[in-house]
Image: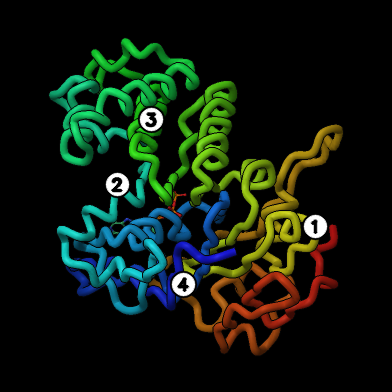
């Protein structure tokens, strides 16, 4: 599988001025990823671990207080690699939307609050495609809306007239309008009820199959990863701690954190309380020395408290853990 995105040792931190001096939040702290084309690629991890920030960096969308401290993001476009963080603004904007589209977490920011939705759709089309194509693409958007359980008449509404869940679905129709090669979807189902969730996932899945493009699906919901992603990465405290085929990760999770995430999933017929990892994630402004997971890890030993483990290959999986063996499963 050819890569479509290659992230190399990305570092992006929020630099905040506080009365007590500078505070640096290490939200993306040395992330390397290879995301193949023609796949649904999952990104999982607890709230605050840096998933949304990583997507912003992948988009090349860094606004203060978020600053780029190192690394590259390469996109393979027509056989060539483009560095999203080094492109001039005009080219980056073009790459964005026509090649990559982004479904942000919480969809309000996508729309102009004082314009009807149809105006946003038309403005978007006018700035990206020829007049000939516009009507056809708008028809596709209306079809997508119908599949998501919304009447195309919704385009006559203003954003504030819609519920969060409706707006989320309209944002998805907008993001898929130009048949992008890469869709970065940040928690696209979180505000939705189960029926709408299923419709959104099915539509994204169908679009992926039809366009043979890549969807990077960010969600903390491991159940969704198990059902729709092919490969996935697990993020913890700004770093990728495990990566591989989704099926392998669910059958032989190598990182103790991944093992906890999987064990905390509900199972039919099992009425025991699900177990989550003890304690809480570290502050990204004050990381512990060594492996950032070590204060919560039942297997931590000396080296874990002193050295940060790199992501290394173990068979077809990658894991950042000094134990590095499938035999260290968390036992109850
Ligand atoms: N604009 C900002 N200014 C300062 N810190 C921020 C900002 N946005 C996010 N952060 C911090 O960066 C870290 C990573 O946040 P991020 O939103 O990327 O996490 P996330 O994994 O997407 O979480 P969630 O699952 O809740 O969406 C958190 O510690 C958060 O408090
Ligand atoms: Mg987020």
Q: Is residue 105 visible?
A: no
Task: Check the image and report above or below for 49 versus 111.
Answer: below
Disc assigned to residue 251:
1
Identify the residue shown where x is 39% and y is 65%: 75
Distance, label 1 to label 4, CA atoms, is 24 Å
Are dots 3 and 1 in contact, CB under 8 Å? no
The residue tagged 3 is 173
Are dots 2 and 3 in contact, CB under 8 Å? no
Label 1 or label 4, whichever comes before in sequence order: 4
The residue tagged 4 is 31
Label 1 or label 2, whichever comes before in sequence order: 2
Which image quarter: residue 141?
A: top left
The color scheme shown is rainbow
Distance, label 4 to label 3, CA atoms, is 30 Å
Q: Residue furthest front?
A: 132
Label 4 or label 2, whichever comes before in sequence order: 4
The local crowd at label 4, few if under 14, some if 14 to 19, many if 20 or more residues have their Cα within 10 Å, is many
Are dots 1 and 2 in contact, CB under 8 Å? no
Distance, label 1 to label 2, CA atoms, is 36 Å
The local crowd at label 3, few if under 14, some if 14 to 19, many if 20 or more residues have their Cα within 10 Å, is many
Which quadrant is the N terminus positioned in? bottom right
Label 3 or label 1, whichever comes before in sequence order: 3
Q: Is residue 259 left or right of residue 10?
A: right
Q: Position of residue 203 (x, y in %)?
A: 52, 31
Q: Which one is in front in this view, the residue at disc 3 or the one at disc 1?
A: 3
Q: Is residue 174 left or right of residue 290?
A: left
The residue tagged 2 is 97
Q: Which one is in front in this view, the residue at disc 1 or the one at disc 2?
A: 2
Q: Position of residue 200 (x, y in %)?
A: 51, 30
Distance, label 2 to label 3, CA atoms, is 13 Å
Task: Check the image and report above or below for 106 versus 151.
Answer: below
């Amino acid at each position: 599988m050819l890569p479509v995105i290659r992230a190399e040792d990305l570092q992006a931190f929020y630099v905040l001025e506080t009365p007590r001096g500078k505070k640096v939040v290490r939200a993306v702290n040395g992330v390397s990823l290879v995301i193949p084309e023609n796949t649904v690629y999952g990104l999982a991890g607890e709230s605050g671990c840096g998933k949304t920030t990583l997507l912003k960096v992948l988009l090349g969308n860094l606004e203060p207080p978020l600053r780029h401290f190192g690394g590259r993001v390469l996109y393979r476009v027509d056989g060539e690699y483009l560095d999203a963080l080094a492109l001039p603004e005009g080219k980056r904007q073009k790459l964005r939307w026509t090649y990559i589209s982004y479904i942000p977490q919480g969809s309000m920011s996508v729309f102009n609050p004082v314009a009807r939705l149809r105006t946003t759709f038309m403005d978007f089309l006018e700035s990206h495609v020829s007049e000939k194509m516009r009507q056809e693409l708008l028809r596709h958007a209306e079809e997508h809306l119908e599949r998501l359980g919304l009447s195309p008449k919704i385009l006559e509404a203003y954003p504030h007239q819609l519920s969060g869940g409706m707006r989320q679905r309209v944002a998805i129709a907008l993001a898929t309008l130009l048949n992008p090669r890469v869709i970065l979807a940040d928690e696209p189902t979180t505000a939705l009820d189960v029926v709408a969730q299923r419709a959104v996932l099915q539509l994204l899945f169908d679009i992926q199959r039809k366009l043979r493009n890549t969807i990077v699906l960010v969600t903390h919901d491991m159940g969704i990863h198990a059902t729709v992603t092919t490969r996935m990465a697990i993020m913890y405290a700004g770093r990728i701690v495990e990566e591989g085929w989704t099926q392998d990760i669910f059958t032989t999770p190598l990182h103790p954190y991944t093992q906890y995430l999987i064990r905390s999933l509900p199972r039919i017929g099992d009425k025991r309380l699900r177990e989550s990892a003890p304690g809480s994630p570290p502050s990204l402004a004050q990381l512990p020395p060594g492996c950032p997971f070590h204060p919560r890890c039942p297997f931590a030993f000396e080296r874990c408290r002193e050295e940060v483990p790199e992501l290394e290959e173990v068979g077809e999986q990658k894991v950042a853990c000094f134990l590095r063996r499938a035999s260290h499963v968390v036992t109850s």
